[in-house]
Image (cartoon, rainbow, N blue to C red):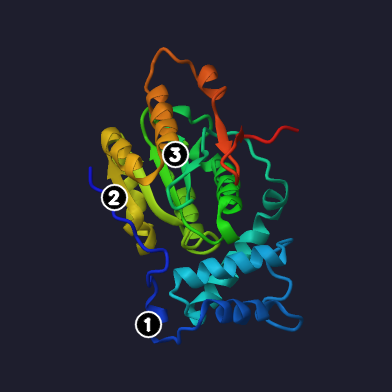
Amino acid sequence: ASVVVCVDPGAQNSRDADDSPVVAPDRGVRELMDLFLPGMPFCGLGGSSTESERRSLCRRLLRKNACSVVPCVPRLKHALNWRAKHDALFSERRFAVAGDYRVIGADLDRRPVLYTCMKNQLLPYSQFRDQQVVTMLHAIDNMPGGAGAAIQICDLHGMRLRMADLNPAPLVEWARSQENYFAGMMLEVIIIDMPRMASYLKEAVWPLMPAGVKQRIKFMSLQQAKEHLETACDAEVAGRIAEVMEQNRDCSISLEERQQTWTRVDHSGTPVPMVAQS
């Protein structure tokens, strides 16, 4: 296990940007947004995305690429195509519950904290993407201006690898989305109690991961994670996450009982049902 190293979301992550002019953030957003005007290359891309959504995406990409517009352009195109591919998911925000992945709180800088425990995995990882996307959208909803960063906690306690989970493709696709549509959102990814049996998947996926994602992944023990959260979050949030982690390790609490406690927090920090009521 190791100590978490925070990576600045605005740090330079692209060799392409080294030789590209750096502009003020507002000017960069304007230049990228101009690509959506009639007759311009990105007009009509991005499915049903709104102007506000596209503007937030441009801000995230600029932060990711140190306010250099040139490397943002191909990443923006990739993100828009990916967004269009999942248009219904973005519009409806409905998903089959694959586990307990949700926004569980925020740190002292109001950055959303996302949490999931593999003990609560209900579906193969290949069917987990929809819930991941909607949870990331919830995190964006909670960010001032929709362009901040977040902390992700992956608690691997109780992990059960299925044959479908041995395919690294879904993990790689998700990692690449973190470099484009959700660019710069993951300040750090804390992986807790990684079991030895998961080493195969890590070895298969690690060489395919973007370098920027690798930098933000840190492996920790349960105790290290608790100590880190006590300094990163206020007492209420740190206590809530610690309680959830302990609950997931309590063999006397059934899955059904744990499911009753699966709530997320909205932009005001108020706990709401993890899945919207129909």
As drawn, 179 above or below 73: above
Going by the numbered disc 2, the residue's amino acid type is Val
Instruction: Sort mark 2 into few (<14), some (14-19) or many (20+) by Cα contacts within 10 Å.
Output: some
Q: Is residue 99 left or right of residue 275?
A: left
As drawn, 142 above or below 29: above
Pair 1/2: label in front: 2
Nearer-N-terminus badge (1/3): 1
* Quadrant where the image shows the N terminus: top left
Q: Which residue matches tag 1?
A: 18
Q: Of all residues shown, which one is farthest toward the top?
A: 252
Q: Are marks 1 and 3 in contact (CB under 8 Å)?
A: no
Instruction: Sort mark 1 into few (<14), some (14-19) or many (20+) by Cα contacts within 10 Å.
Output: some
CA gap between label 1 and label 2 equals: 27 Å
Mark yes or no: residue 62 visible: yes
Q: Which residue matches tag 3?
A: 165
Going by the numbered disc 3, the residue's amino acid type is Asp
Q: Is residue 257 left or right of residue 41?
A: left
The part of the image, by quadrant, that contains residue 56 is bottom right
CA gap between label 1 and label 3 equals: 38 Å
Query: At x 65% / y 54%, what residue is drawn?
Result: 86
Q: Depth check: 186 or 237 in front?
A: 237
Query: At x 53% / y 17%, what residue is drawn?
Result: 257
Element assignment for label 3? helix
Give x and y (percent) for residue 227: 29, 38
